[in-house]
């Protein structure tokens, strides 16, 4: 008779191959790794005839071994073992399959589960889940059901099955990562679409306030906005959110929404920024993020801006070839409600035919000549493009910092506010003290004469300006103060004189010329101004504080 042993070994070998093929096929086509692990673990335990079995995977964040699936009399799913703990920990560290013939005598065996459940572990077979030398976890089998020991053939089979499981784990993680990437891509696309929708609608090239934004990534932490108010003033803002990614984009969207809503009711930028700050502090949830922001109210009729700056890059005024910077008056928004008071500092800027540029730190920190561009580099660029129309000017600066097809290191946002009125014959700021009046009269006369006016017209304008300035000095300020004077020749043969002071607003109902029959010292200044000028109009200054005087003289 033939020996049946080789036939039994052959049958066992083919059964092992069938199991390996079946398990590999199930793992490769699995859409639910947890369910497949549980099902596969049961088949392995039955095939090797083990009383209990478990899958442990390495937690990628902590390094702990966590039981993902188990079969047998005790459910240990979720059990955590510290790195290197127990037989499983040793197998994962050494990346080698092992048989423990006597668990009680093995120094690595921990009887924690046995102590808690009453289960008795006699012998252990454990194989690593290994792919290209990286161990992702281990399969552990406990006790042969017939009381025998695990043998080398069991170890070899479990090692091969472990490699198959490891491949399934890697594929599952890759699939999860791809799904997550696709989800993030959709979210980023949606966030970018929302941000683009929040940028100002396309403004004509001749609009006095324009801006441009070039994000470094799909979504931006920078923003700008431009709104035209019913009173003719233009409200604008520029901001930069700390941080990157979705969180920064969400805070940017929130800040921009608050600005657009509040700018329709507030009349000054300081209280507007203070209110935005209070809202951000109340609802930020301690995220540790903040917003640098500058906002302004521009009056095209007088060419002046009332500006408030909360921790943002200093805007630059380019006028007559010279730059003036306007640093922040308070820290950024969203840090503390008390850091941005309702009466935060505001700056009144008479553009005088100049251009006010606002930008984010993506410009100043852009690379230039081996270092960051900085404020001087920005000034140089703005001078180089000064002769271009406004929109082309903005685009040219951005293109130089981020050529088409290249992504900048940080978001780039640039705005310009332009005084589009006729260039002034004279634009000067002076102290409201009598000592300045002599030189001022000389400057006024020279400016009017240079504008092609007759000496008699120049004399009338000098008299009117002198009287107006004396009234400001005597009755407006109770101490030091500043006055802005502009003179320009308008089309149609008109000379326009504009004086802005920052004293207490006058009661316009009480400003009227005194009757000449009322003989007493002083009080005839308005009468003289009206007698030599064709129109004299007192208005509240757009800053909400101070006074605006406009005088018109017809030129023969």
Image (cartoon, rainbow, N blue to C red):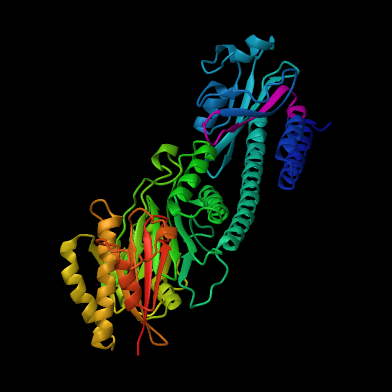
Q: Which segment is the magenta one? A: 45-64
Count of number-bearing discs: 0
Give above or below for 313 relative to 170: below
The x, y position of residue 531, in whole percent, is 33, 76
The x, y position of residue 257, in whole percent, is 57, 53
Q: Residue at x 65, y 14 (%)?
A: 122
Give above or below for 56 relative to 346: above
Magenta span contains residue 544:
no
Residue closest to the far right: 1
**In the picture provided, is 18 more to the left or to the right than 109?**
right
**In the picture provided, is 410 more to the left or to the right than 457?**
right
Magenta span contains residue 54:
yes
The x, y position of residue 92, in whole percent, is 54, 31
Q: Residue at x 63, y 57 (%)?
A: 190
Seen from the viewer's position, the closer of residues 9 and 273 is 273
Pick the quarter of the image with the N terminus. top right
**Among the 4 quarters of the image, the one containing residue 435:** bottom left
Give above or below for 56 relative to 326: above
């Amino acid at each position: 008779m033939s020996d049946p042993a080789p036939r039994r070994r052959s049958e066992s070998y083919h059964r092992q191959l069938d199991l390996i093929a079946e398990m590999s096929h199930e793992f490769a086509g699995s859409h639910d790794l947890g369910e497949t692990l549980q099902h596969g673990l049961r088949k392995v335990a039955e095939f090797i005839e083990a009383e209990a079995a478990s899958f442990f995977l390495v937690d990628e964040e902590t390094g702990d071994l966590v039981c993902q699936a188990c079969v047998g009399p005790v459910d240990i799913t979720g059990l955590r073992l510290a790195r290197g703990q127990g037989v499983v920990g040793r197998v994962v560290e050494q990346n080698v399959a092992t048989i423990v013939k006597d668990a009680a005598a093995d120094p690595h065996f921990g009887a924690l589960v046995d102590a808690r459940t009453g289960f008795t572990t006699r012998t252990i077979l454990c194989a690593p889940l290994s792919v290209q030398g990286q161990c992702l976890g281990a399969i552990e089998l406990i006790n042969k059901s017939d009381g025998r020991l695990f043998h080398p053939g069991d170890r070899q089979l479990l090692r091969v099955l472990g490699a198959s499981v490891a491949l399934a784990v890697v594929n599952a993680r890759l699939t999860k990562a791809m799904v997550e990437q696709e989800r993030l891509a959709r979210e980023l696309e949606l966030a970018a679409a929302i941000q683009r929708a929040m940028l100002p609608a396309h403004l004509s090239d001749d609009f006095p306030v324009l801006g441009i934004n070039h994000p470094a990534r799909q979504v931006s932490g920078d923003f700008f906005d431009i709104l035209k108010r019913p009173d003719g003033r233009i409200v604008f803002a520029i901001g930069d959110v700390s941080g990157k990614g979705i969180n920064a984009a969400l805070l940017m969207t929130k800040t921009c929404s608050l600005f657009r809503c509040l700018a329709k009711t507030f009349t000054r930028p300081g209280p507007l920024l203070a209110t935005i700050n209070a809202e951000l502090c109340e609802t930020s949830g301690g995220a540790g993020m903040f917003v640098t922001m500058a906002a302004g109210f521009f009056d095209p009729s007088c060419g002046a801006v009332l500006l408030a700056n909360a921790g943002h890059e200093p805007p630059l005024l380019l006028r007559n070839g010279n730059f003036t910077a306007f640093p922040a008056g308070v820290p950024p928004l969203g840090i503390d409600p008390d850091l941005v008071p309702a009466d935060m500092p505001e700056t009144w800027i008479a553009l005088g035919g100049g251009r006010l540029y606002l930008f984010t730190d993506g410009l100043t920190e852009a690379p230039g000549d081996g270092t960051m561009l900085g404020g001087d580099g920005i000034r140089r660029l703005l001078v180089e493009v000064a002769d271009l129309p406004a929109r082309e000017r903005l685009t040219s600066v951005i293109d130089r910092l981020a050529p088409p097809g290249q992504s900048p290191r940080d978001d780039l946002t640039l705005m310009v506010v332009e005084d589009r009125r006729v260039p002034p014959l004279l634009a000067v700021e002076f102290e409201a003290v009598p000592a300045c009046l002599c030189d001022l009269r000389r400057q006024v006369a020279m400016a009017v004469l240079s504008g092609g006016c007759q000496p008699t017209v120049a004399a009338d304008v000098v008299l009117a300006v002198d009287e107006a300035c004396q009234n400001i000095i005597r009755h407006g300020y109770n101490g030091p103060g500043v006055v802005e004077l502009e003179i320009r020749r308008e089309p149609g043969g008109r000379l326009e004189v504009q004086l802005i002071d920052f004293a207490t607003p006058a009661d316009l109902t009480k400003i009227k010329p005194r009757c000449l029959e009322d003989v007493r010292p002083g009080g005839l200044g308005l009468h003289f101004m009206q007698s030599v000028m064709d129109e004299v109009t007192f208005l509240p200054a757009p800053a909400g504080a101070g006074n605006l005087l406009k005088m018109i003289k017809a030129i023969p």
